[in-house]
Amino acid sequence: MPAVTVELIKSLRDQTGAGVSDCKKALEDTEGDLTRAAEALRQKGFEQAAKRADRETSQGLIESYIHTGGRVGAMVQLGCETDFVARTEEFRALAHDIAMQVAAMSPLYLSEDDLPEDDERPAAQVCLLQQPFIKDGSKTLADLVRETAAQTGENVRIVQFTRLALGE
């Protein structure tokens, strides 16, 4: 079994944002395999985020995005549990990416739960959380929110969004 070095732990911590002891344990469990350790930490974070899903998200921020030319814009209210998390760069970046997604993809509903029965369009077309992320089509917006929740250790959710466009 390869030795788990400080450099490996630091690299995994930089990549995942997980604690030092969690990184060390993940590397030991995966025999020093950085990729498998990162995936293990990601799964652990998702499991912990699912346990926090019912927690209140009374903090957060409102982010806006105006597309070049000023003809399309979006606003998003992204909630979390504490103002400490709301001020982190990861949280702000997520809010900005969501606002950009709303401006670009024109979702009508937050999730499939909001989709009326008579609307037969695909959920990935009209539901924000089911849409493929515009910067990385291998992930959905729901995946991004879960990843941020796992990384921050708090419940993170999109509270509301709106899109404005000239001529619509």
Image (cartoon, rainbow, N blue to C red):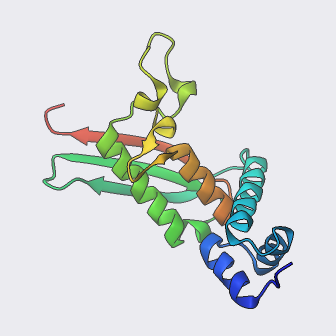
Number of numbered discs: 0
* Residue displayed at 81% across by 78% down: 24
- In the rendering, at what x and y percent does residue 68 appear? 17, 56
Residue 43 picture location, percent across and down: 73, 55
Residue at 55% x, 65% y is: 86
Instruction: In this rendered view, identify the residue nearer to me: 139 or 66.
Output: 139
122 relative position to 10: left or right:
left
86 versus 20 height, above or below: above
Q: Which of 142 and 64 is in front in this view?
A: 142
Looking at the image, which residue is at 21% across and 39% down? 165
Residue 93 placed where, x, y %?
45, 64
Residue 68 or residue 2, whichever sits in front: 2
x and y percentages locating residue 58 in the rendered image: 61, 54
Q: In this view, does 166 lie to the left or right of 159?
A: left
Farthest-out residue, top: 118
User: Of 64 and 42, which appears nearest the observer?
Assistant: 42
Residue at x-position 74% and y-position 71%: 33
**Residue 62 visible at all:** no
Viewport quadrant of the C terminus: top left
Residue 137, placed above or below residue 4: above
**Which residue in the rendered view is the most extreme toward the front?**
1
Quadrant of the drawing holding the N terminus:
bottom right
Image quadrant of residue 60?
A: bottom right
Query: Is residue 139 visible from the viewing direction of this image?
Result: yes
**In the rendered image of this protein, does residue 118 appear above or below residue 27?**
above
Q: Is residue 108 above or below residue 39?
A: above
- Please give left or right for residue 28 compared with residue 124 in the image: right
